[in-house]
Amino acid sequence: MSHSKSILLKNIQALKNQFSWLERSYLICQHIPSGRDYSPEEMDALETLCSRFARSIDYLIRKVFRSIDGVELENQGTLIDVVNNAEKRGLIEPTDKLREIKELRIDIVHEYVLEDVKSLFVDVIEATPSVLEIMQNTITYCSKYRQ
């Protein structure tokens, strides 16, 4: 097994773990009513979802998509190149959607005002199914490399 394939398989295993944790957080948070003050437990759950959401996006793009490019001998240029390659493989919808998700990740990292956080929680809950779908598409796509 080549070194790049070995790295990809390790990254896919980690992605599967992240998928499970992100999905768990989403299932907990999707029923929390929005637009009101949250209990401490709800805030903890929502902040955990945001954290897992941001880490999943980073890992998917910076590690997994780059690993796929390495195995398939694609140019590992800019982040835009990596995302464009993922789009060509059918792993993601048009790059505008992923760009929106990336911007949401940036908002998560830099959001400090409580009222803005409430709006951010709604956005993350709405975007999480798309991220889970991209993760699942990627896991399915890479199953051909398990042999």
Image: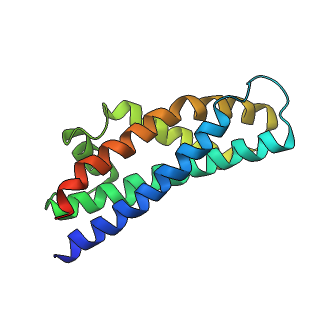
Q: Residue at x 25, y 43 (%)?
A: 84
Q: Residue furthest left?
A: 73
Q: Specify the quadrant of the image occupied by residue 145.
A: bottom left
Q: Is residue 50 above or below residue 115?
A: below
Nearest to the observer: residue 1 or residue 126: 1
**Residue 134, image x, y percentages:** 37, 41
Q: Specify the quadrant of the image occupied by residue 143.
A: bottom left
Q: Specify the quadrant of the image occupied by residue 10.
A: bottom left
Q: Residue at x 42, y 63 (%)?
A: 14
Q: Is residue 101 above or below residue 82?
A: above
Q: In what quadrant of the picture does the C terminus appear? A: bottom left
Q: Residue at x 22, y 71 (%)?
A: 4
Q: Residue at x 34, y 60 (%)?
A: 12
**Residue 1, image x, y percentages:** 16, 76
Q: Is residue 73 above or below residue 53?
A: below
| Numbered marks: total | 0
**Residue 24, image x, y percentages:** 58, 45
- Its colouring scheme is rainbow
> In screen coordinates, is 58 left or right of 115?
left
Nearest to the observer: residue 81 or residue 72: 72
Q: Is residue 5 above or below residue 31?
A: below
**Residue 123, image x, y percentages:** 60, 30
